[in-house]
Image (cartoon, helix red, strand yellow):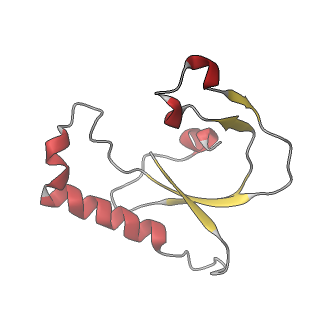
Amino acid sequence: ELLVTLFLVEKMLPFEAVEIEGARRYVELNMMGSRSLPRAEQFCRPAEPSESTVTAVALDAICFNSYGISKGTQYQPHHVLREIRKCLAALTLPAHSDPSTRRSFVTG
């Protein structure tokens, strides 16, 4: 997954996103979407080996359910502006990139 990026990239500024090129899947999981599933149906297992890679764009959207931030503040103008700037940074192609490259978006 993209966990290694956490150790290699410093904290992003409010107007930054990170493009990760050549990522490969090593683990297959359904942990985030399976909170309501019985434990026996949740899984985290090695993925099938593959040579395919993906280009992912990561942006750090604020999670208003965490960090003691009231969920009711998410629509305050400065929070909305930050999220719009993050999306703009993620959607803007780097100068050297190929516009035909398919990109996945990752938030966290």
The residue positioned farthest toward the top in the image shown = 39
Q: Nearer the viewer, residue 103 or 92?
A: 103
- Spot occupied by residue 63 in the image (x, y as percentages of width and height): 32, 42
Residue for point 61% across, 26% down: 42
- Spot occupied by residue 57 in the image (x, y as percentages of width and height): 55, 60
Q: Nearer the viewer, residue 94 or 44?
A: 44
Quick one: quadrant of the C terminus? Answer: top left
Residue for point 14% across, 46% down: 73
Residue for point 76% across, 57% down: 53
Q: Is residue 60 left or right of residue 24?
A: left
Q: Is residue 29 left or right of residue 46?
A: left
Residue for point 47% across, 28% down: 35
Q: Is residue 78 above or below residue 3?
A: below
Q: Quadrant of residue 41?
A: top right
Q: Is residue 96 above or below residue 77?
A: below
Quick one: quadrant of the N terminus? Answer: top right
- Spot occupied by residue 77 in the image (x, y as percentages of width and height): 14, 61
Number of numbered discs = 0
- Spot occupied by residue 8 in the image (x, y as percentages of width and height): 59, 44
